[in-house]
Amino acid sequence: PGTLKEAAAAKGRVFGAAAAQSHMGEAAYASTLDREFNQLTPENEMKWDTTEPSRNSFNFGPADQLVAHAQAQGMKIRGHTLVWHNQLPGWVGGISSRDDLLSAMRGHIAKEAGHFAGKIAYWDVVNEAFQDGSGVRRDSVFQRVIGDGYIEEAFRAARAADPTAELCYNDFNIDGRNSKSDAVYALVKDFKARGVPIDCVGLQAHLTLGNVPSDMQANMQRFADLGVDVHITELDVRMSTPADGSKLAIQANDYKKVVSACLAVSRCTVITVWGVTDKYSWVPDVFPGQGAALLFDDNYGKKPAYNASLEALGGT
Ligand code: G3I
């Protein structure tokens, strides 16, 4: 198999990319996406500030276009994301009564997950609910006004709105074992014990050069052992730019490690990179002086990390 999606399929895996509707008119962007990937995550188009910018006023236009493209290509679609503290419209942050916020959140989930029901393979129901570097819940309007129970409320609402999608909790810096991934582990264990619907955990895997956690496979396995699938949802490996041969070689080895760790865990079923090309990666905007984090360079050339990933999947 000569493409990522073919090689992954031969191993019973899905290989995806985040994509933005605003770039779909660029021929090389769309053709690279279509050739290599069989799962699409809308990078921004399904976020709350786009889909419900004012209360009860919904806009699914950009996401509908991406969904139509993915369906025409036979790609699975990852819904991203129903409840997140970022890219949240101002009106949500202004709600101060628990009942009102619960009803706004349930309403948002019912409408959005309902709109796409039957078309979504996996939903990132709740994104980034824990603080970085600890097991403490992140401060957000949901945490403050509703309390710890908002996460399970969101999962219950998502299941009701779309009974066929796999429902995931998604976060960053939970790729290896640490206090944050321990907290997510405890959450999943509790949900499983109490029958709260959850099917998968998304490890975002926004990594830095040479720093793939050595216990990533073990961490994925412990989640799998709780009875959920594990997805690598936003993989990229950033470096200081400009890239050079030695950095690209380290990066290739990093991608190989991540892909191999996934293949070693039978419930690790999806690997998704956070963008098609370095040209449009989020990294330089947020980390000035860093970038070159993905599998294709600015000119859609295959990087060493591409070849290493393909090889790790058993492709050539
Ligand atoms: O759409 C506006 C445009 O109208 C405006 O002219 C322009 C000027 O800045 O901004 C555009 O919005 C930007 C949007 O991306 C679309 O390009 C926002 O400023 C920018 O903040 C936003 O960044 C996104 C980021 O999430 C925001 O939190 C990135 O594209 C997206 O890759 C990134 O994705 C997140 C995942 O959802 C969750 N995990 C982390 C990951 C990386 O941060």
Image (spheres, helix red, strand yellow):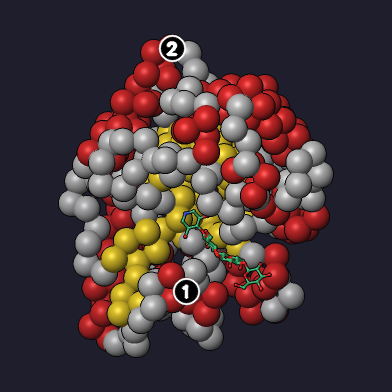
For the residues labelled 1 and 2, the Cα–Cα distance comes to 41 Å
Q: List the residue tagged with mark 1.
A: 285
**From what the image shows, is residue 288 above or below residue 150?**
below
Residue 190 at least partly seen:
yes
Residue at (59, 32) in percent of width and height: 96
Foreground residue among 69 and 201:
201
Q: Nearer the viewer, residue 92 or 37?
A: 92
Q: Nearer the viewer, residue 276 or 207?
A: 207
Q: Quadrant of the C terminus?
A: bottom left
For residue 293, which quarter of the picture? Answer: bottom left
Q: Is residue 217 above or below residue 260?
A: above
Disc 2 marks which residue? 194
Q: What type is the residue that disc 1 sits on?
A: Asp
Q: Position of residue 37 (x, y in %)?
A: 56, 60
Label ID, residue 298:
none
Residue 316, placed above or below residue 148: below
Q: Judge left or right: residue 210 versus residue 228.
A: left
Q: Earlier in the sequence, mark 1 or mark 2?
A: 2
Q: Is residue 26 above or below residue 44?
A: below
